[in-house]
Image: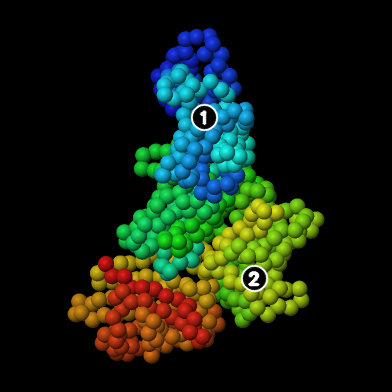
Amino acid sequence: MNSTTKSTSSGRHGPLALFGSALTLALVAGFLPGDASAKSGGNDGQEVLQFLASTGADGNGTARARWRDKGDGSLDFSVELEHMDAGSYELYVTDLDLSKGSISVGGTGQGEIEFKAPLDSPKPLFDFEVFDQVVEVRQGATIFFTDTFSANGSGGNGGSGGSGNNSGDKTKTEVYMVNVGPDINAQGKLKYEIKSNKTKFAIEVEKLDAGTYTLLVAGTPVAQITTVSSASVVLEFQNPVEAGKTLLNFDPLGAQIDVELDGTTYLTGVLSGSDTSTGTKAPNKGSQGAKDLGKTKGDELLVFLANSGVQAGASGKAKLTQTGETEFEVEIENVPAGDYPLSVNGTPVGTLSADSTGHAQLNYSTSPRGGVMLLTFEVKGQLIEVKSGADVILSTVFPTSVQSALGKYKKETFKSNKVNVNLINAGADLDATGTLSWKLKGNGEQELQIQVKDLPAGDYGVVVNSVPSTSVLTVSPKPSSGKGKLTFATVAKGSKLLLDFDPVGALVQLTDSSDVVVLQAVIDVP
């Protein structure tokens, strides 16, 4: 799948200085990469890492192959398994009828075999070629991993992520994660960058309730994220790894990435494939992944589909409109003529039939007419996938709102006497935003203010900890206004209503005429 070549500085007197016999010289020369001197930078050592392509026999398992010249005249080659069922696995290289050795995996799901030259007992001798050779990991007749081990930065099955040798790839992308869990405030962001022969991947989460969450990439657990408060937590992966970072030994590109706790997904998002594999440019900023088409005059959100890297040049977009009837549209371009199944949350919902120009489109509506299909499924917070056969070529997790799609959050304040937080859009109205402010005055009086904008004219109910209030927030019917404000105080006067509930720690919600939650927030006082 993905490999990396890197240099490791070390004093040496030639790559074969410790090998005394002509026979050993001949053996080692046979499995050094052809351009080793160029890659090693003269007297520096070098290392090639590659993650072998999985056959899917174990959905969670990973296999990493490593060739290394330490720079002191010694060489080694190893294959490491992780997240595998306990047992014994056989390693094959080139000769697929003769095992090179066994990899024993214990209860931790990990196992490794390492070969060395010169011989370093009890490790077996590294006396066979690996570059441009087929490497397989089997158990009986079942093949778990098979790939061509390459010295040029790309495995036999393509791909790019997790690589320190970037082969000219300049991918740099950022994606806002979608909140699909019970923690209404939770936010997340994914970043991937190839720079200076380093590959970096980071996930930042904030406002997640305290706990230990699992980070999954393409359904495989890769790390834990521990939060102790709602503060921001950043987990950084890198290859080659540096102090304070975790080794990037998986490929996040083209994959769905989830943050889960006890089987419940809280945050999710999809990264596009590498720029070289997609033939397109990934969005540099999270806000470039979507457009607010409705702005102040409508309720319409467009999201660009991420190219997984399977179909170079393919592009697509999905659009959701909520003005009276609800409409959903998916459009793809630059694909070969043919049929492309469309699925939402894993369920097939239609087929996109591309014409000779490479274009196809499907339209859905809650009030269909003239070739438009009936919209019977939820779109917000769902995984949208366009496939070619069994392969996903374009996908996204559709955001719940414009606010989350574009990261439109105002700076918040958390003090013992003053809190100002964003009202979180629940999705009923895509572009609605607002703030919830609480203030404790010196004389002990409290004040709570709700401000909203981009809401349709009308009256909105105020619900506190699931209990409806008698108060109503009114949005002016003036054109393009969409604004409204409501102020509570412990001493009611003028336009201020009586604050007859404890706002500290309370869940405050605004509901529409159908009692559907539109905006919500919690006043968290430190």
Q: CA distance from mark 1 to mark 2?
A: 55 Å
Find residue 144 and report its horizontal and vertical position in percent: 57, 42
- What's the colour scheme? rainbow
Give me the residue at 37% from left, 85% from top.
467
In the rendered structure, find residue 219 and report the number of the disc placed on it.
Answer: none
Q: Is residue 152 visible?
A: no
Residue for badge 1: 101
Between circles 1 and 2, the one closer to the viewer is 1
Around disc 2, counting alpha carbons within 10 Å, would you say few (fewer than 14), some (14 to 19), or many (20 or more)?
many
Position of residue 122 relative to residue 192, above or below, is above
Count every numbered label the image shows and give the total: 2
- Kind of residue sitting beneath label 2: Phe
Give me the residue at 48% from left, 84% from top.
515
Residue for badge 2: 328
Give me the residue at 59% from left, 28% from top.
98
Give me the residue at 48% from left, 15% from top.
16
**Quadrant in the picture for residue 412:** bottom left
Numbered disc 2: secondary structure: strand
Numbered disc 1: secondary structure: strand
